[in-house]
Image (cartoon, rainbow, N blue to C red):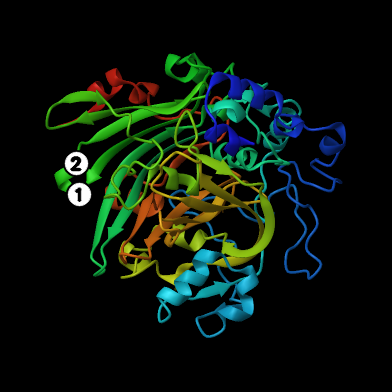
Amino acid sequence: MSRINTMLNGAIVILLSSLLLPNWAMAELTSDELSRLGIEGTELTPMGAIRAGNKEGTIPEWKSKPISGIAGSETNNVIDPFANEKPLFTITVDNYEKYKEKLTVGQVAMFKTYPGTFFMNVYPTHRTGSYDERIYQATLAQAKKIIVCPEYEKTGRVCLDNEIDGGGIPFPIPKTGVEAVWSHYLAFRERSSNAMYNGVIVDYLGNRTDVIQHMRQIYPWWVSNDSELKKSKVLTIMGGSVYCGAQLLKKPTRSAGLMFGGCIYMNDFSARAYLYLPGQRRVRKAPEIGFHDSPSFGSDGMITSEDRWMMWFGGKYTRHDYATPIRKELFVPYNNNKLADKNLSFDDIFGKKHINQSLVRYELHRVWVVEATVKEGLFDLYKRQTAYFDEDTWVALGNETYDQKDRLWRVAEQYNVFIHGLNITRGIGDVHIDLITGRYASYPFWQYQAGEIEGFGPPRFTTRDGEDIGFSTELFTPQGLRKHGRR
């Protein structure tokens, strides 16, 4: 139906198409569907994951409480509760055909492109994606009434209706691809973060450039309306912000001092961003930042805004149609606490062609597979994309993108960790590999290593209302950038 809308123009056609929309496209969950969700004793978890393990026993049952016996994060590092485990088996170019049905398209391509260096160590599966009960309760409350707005089917506008205060995964039982992408975008990573981040750019010869940034982020979707933070105007205008971020480049030296800040709003999903130019000591609007296929900040064009978080909408009006999500069992990067070790150098982590695979942990998990295809009549750098969302957390684990000739172009993986004590799952690193040029890059992550190098220390995450975020929301405004910018 959405493809018909993009092919036909005019107000009369739009009106008729809105009358013909299938009811399920905008319908809230039924009482029967809601009864399947619960913290204990239901078929599905609050996040919509299948509670039971698989029949082979290779995926265990989900538990609502975080695994016990873990003291939490150390002062300046992250604990790896599975450090003593050995791989169950290793997948290589010689045996990957045996496991092909549980491999992503991108992983198969990596075996073919880098047969001598790419391999996958597969470990026992641990479903560590558990949260504090308030996250479950928020999700169960949010899922009762929320819907994708009718304007999405009419015009492609990115918006929600009937949302309530307090956060929550909006669509734990996704009926459409756009619902799945919304749940992924609003996944609970943390309430705010304040940390040094590092991205890398590696050319086809293996030469690496490190791009270190001071990044500060807020996820206001998960901040309650009675929080002190919600007194900030920048978070409350235009239906309320769902994400705000600011990045200050520290390295390389030639770009040091360049800074941007901005927010994405419920009523305007375009990134309202501003850029501070240290050479000119001025701030300008930066509509290109965060917009669809524009280059991601500090990536030398290797990562687009759409690649961030492995897939997202990229603007007020989406350029893509999203296919109905499919749940599959796949070998995916999971519990990659080893990669968060502050004592790992970047030389240890990044190889000439891809990440050091001996440091990556793969497990068998159920994931939501979502396909996105550019709408008829629109253009995007990527003709189509595939993304993989973890069923327990909705945090993405990887993606593939295709060029205009429908060739597999770029392959990405995201390395998530569960941080004990904080009880959050979030990305700790990623890689984006260009199969055509032989280059690869990482979006700014690697917070523990970058914090150690810069003397900043570990990342400072907040997860609850009332905790000090450690910075001012002015950073997301032109006035704040002028104040905080440095030559």
Q: Cβ–Cβ below 8 Å for labels 2 and 1?
A: yes
Q: How many marks?
A: 2
Q: Is residue 49 visible?
A: yes
Residue type pointed to by label 2: Ala
Residue 53 image offset from top left, x and y in percent: 78, 61
Rendered residue at 53%/22% (across/down): 10
Whether residue 216 is situated above or below residue 332 in the rendered picture: above
- Among the 4 quarters of the image, the one containing residue 435: bottom left
Answer few, some or many: residues within 10 Å of disc 2's Cα (few below 14, many 20 plus, some between 14 and 19).
some
* Residue found at the far left of this picture: 279
Q: Secondary structure at mark 2?
A: loop
Q: Which residue is mark 1?
A: 252
* 180 sits to left or right of 78: right
Q: CA gap, disc 2 to disc 1?
A: 6 Å
- Among the 4 quarters of the image, the one containing residue 397: bottom right
Whether residue 202 is situated above or below residue 261 in the rendered picture: below
Rendered residue at 32%/44% (across/down): 295
Q: Which residue is mark 2?
A: 256
Residue type pointed to by label 1: Pro
Residue 428 image offset from top left, x and y in percent: 46, 52
Q: Is residue 82 visible?
A: no
Q: Secondary structure at mark 1?
A: loop
* 355 sits to left or right of 14: left
Residue 366 image offset from top left, x and y in percent: 68, 58
The quarter of the rendered structure image containing the C terminus is top left
Residue 470 image offset from top left, x and y in percent: 40, 30
Rendered residue at 33%/21% (across/down): 477
